[in-house]
Amino acid sequence: MTSMAQNRKPGWWYPYIFVGAFVVVIGVNATLAYFATSTFTGLSTTDAYEKGRLYNQALAAAKAQAEMGWTVETTAQPRSGGKPGFTLDVSYRDRDGRPVEGLDVRVSVVRPTTVGYDHDVTAAPLGGGRYGGEYDLPLNGVWDLDMVAIGPGPVAYEHEQRIVVP
């Protein structure tokens, strides 16, 4: 009895190329979908939608602040060496150049890249329309100082300063 070896037709492996290519594409897509949904969302602020909705109110407040005519000079010096921190000195002057006294100056110290280190401090009156103090920080790096000076009545003045603590 003779047995004939069965030869495969040329190109018998072409369907396996398509199956392999689809497996690679599906694997890459699944990996990208996993990393897209499980990593940083890109949002570093809470209630971003509500803040965006209140944009017209923010514009009105900025116009009212500009009409006050105040001059504000902010000096934020990072502490060098030792524990991270900074010294803050903010001077408020009205449109006539007179110091503005009796303000409650609150400073939100915000870490723009990392959640969990933000905190609020109060700037002490230093006299002559100046407010400030020396403050500790938990980490070196970039910090945003969002300052609000609240005066008697409806007076409020907002400004910000970015500092880098080496």
Image (cartoon, rainbow, N blue to C red):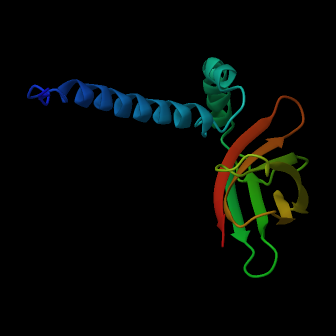
Q: In which quarter of the image is the N terminus?
A: top left
Residue 135, above or below 80: above
State the residue in front, 21 or 75.
21
Horizontal placement of 71 versus 83: left or right? left
Q: Position of residue 145 (x, y in %)?
A: 72, 52
Q: Where is residue 37 in the image (x, y as percent from the top left)?
A: 58, 31
Task: Determine the residue positioned at 36% across, 34% down.
Answer: 24
Horizontal placement of 3 versus 73: left or right? left
State the residue in front, 70 or 35.
35
Q: Position of residue 151 (x, y in %)?
A: 86, 39
Residue 125, above or below 28: below
In which quarter of the view is residue 124 placed?
A: bottom right
Residue 93, above or below 132: above
Residue 128 in view here: no
State the residue in front, 36 or 61.
36
Instruction: Looking at this view, name the residue that lies furthest to the front.
Output: 1
Horizontal placement of 116 versus 45: left or right? right
Q: Position of residue 33 (x, y in %)?
A: 50, 30
Residue 132 in view here: yes
Task: Determine the residue positioned at 71% across, 65% down.
Answer: 76
Horizontal placement of 25 versus 39: left or right? left
Task: Determine the residue positioned at 70% across, 48% down.
Answer: 96
In which quarter of the view is residue 54 placed?
A: top right
Task: Determine the residue positioned at 75% across, 53% down.
Answer: 92
Q: In which quarter of the image is the C terminus?
A: bottom right
